[in-house]
Image (cartoon, helix red, strand yellow):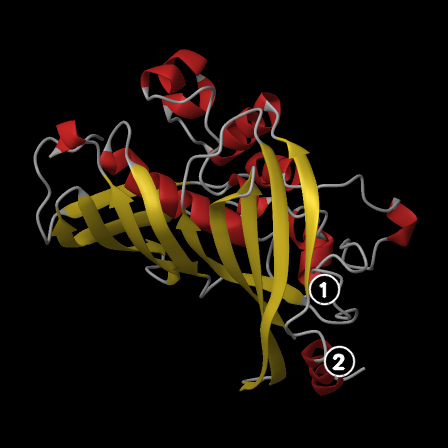
Amino acid sequence: MSVRTIYEDVRQHVGRSFRRDLGRMRSIDLQRFAVAVGDDLPITMDAEAAASAGLPDIAAPPLFLSSVMGWEAGPSESELLADGVPPGGLANLPVGGLRLMGGGQSLEFFQPVVAGTQIVQETLIKDVQLKEGRSGHLVLIQVERSFFCEHALVLRCVETFIGR
Amino acid sequence: MIIQARPVVGDLIGPVEWRPTSIQLFRFSAVTWNSHRIHFDQAYARTEGYPGTLVQSQLHGCFLAHTVLRWAGPGAQLLTFRWENRHFALVGDVLTCAGRVTAVEGRIVTCELQESNQDGRVCAPAWVTVRLLPADI
């Protein structure tokens, strides 16, 4: 399937949105993310430091929510695509056959996310563009994710994916 | 690295060096549930034309964000943060994050940064707005 054909298919999904409950943020997940990144800020590891900063529990590293690719168990290995990515892994879009890369994010932070918080994610297929690159066509897909805690917006992330 | 005085336009941020390792990429893929082989399977990465396993897009962002937060000091909060991945980075690269203050309005500081590799190639530019604690200014 050509990049142009995939672009035409994805274009049909622009404007579609869906919500999902991500569950409660566990301290151990936030801390493991911090360790993996090299985040040495005390409020992400130490509840006392977080309390002295006025937070009820340790804080999520700022890019935690927008970095996690999957919040569910996911498919078995035999169901993964050749590149290791689950089918539909990009907001259930029909991008099978594309080589996808993250192009960056634009984030707005409204309030800190702390351990124990219940988070709901709303995903919007924001835009898709077909571009001419040095080695042929590529598509730029923009996905907007808004994260809510008890109906209050805590983070908005617009991420660009590049598909070749 | 904690700022010692009220920041002014032109103040330098960093440099801070980040040296991604294969273990770091593995752990970042694990905690983000990212099974894309390009980040942990060198043989596969070569089939896509890369000389080794690639630093994850979001990990570039983490390096840049934490460079700013270390500079901004305890209690600082990101308000906005944007970065663009312009060039890939590999395990073993030395990534240097550095930037400068471009605007100051009360406690709100705006900055521009770049993450560059050991050859001076820009991997990811970033634009940040951060709110400092009152005690910091």
Local SS, label 1:
helix
Q: Position of residue B15 (x, y in %)?
A: 25, 44
Residues under numbered marks 2 and 1 in contact, where contact means CB atoms less than 8 Å apart: no
Cα distance between the residues tagged 2 and 1: 27 Å
State whether residue A45 is above or below residue A73: above
- Given residues A114 and A84, the one toward you in this image is A114
Q: What secondary structure is found at the residue carrying circle 2?
A: helix
Label 1 Cα crowd, 10 Å radius (few <14 / some 14-19 / many 20+)? few
Amino acid type, callout 1:
Thr
Residue A86 picture location, percent across and down: 79, 54
Residue under label 2: A9
Q: Chain of mark 1?
A: B
- In the picture, measured across the screen, residue B72 lies left or right of residue B22, that is left
Dot 2: few (<14), some (14–19), or many (≥20) neighbours within 10 Å?
some
Most foreground residue, A11 or A135: A11
The numbered mark at residue B47 is 1
The answer to whether residue B71 is above or below residue A87 is above
Could you tell me residue B133's position as x and y percent?
21, 32
Which residue is found at the position 11% from the left and 30% from the top?
Answer: B4
Q: Which amino acid is tagged 2?
A: Asp
Q: Residue at x 50, y 55 (%)?
A: A157
Image quarter where the C terminus of chain A lies is bottom right
The quadrant of the picture occupied by the N terminus of chain A is: bottom right
Point out which mark residue A18 bears: none
Note whether B97 is above or below B119 in the view shown.
Answer: above
Asked if marks 2 and 1 fall on the same chain, the answer is no
Residue at 10% from the left image edge and 53% from the top image edge: B9
Residue B125 appears left or right of B2: right
Which residue reaches farthest top? A48
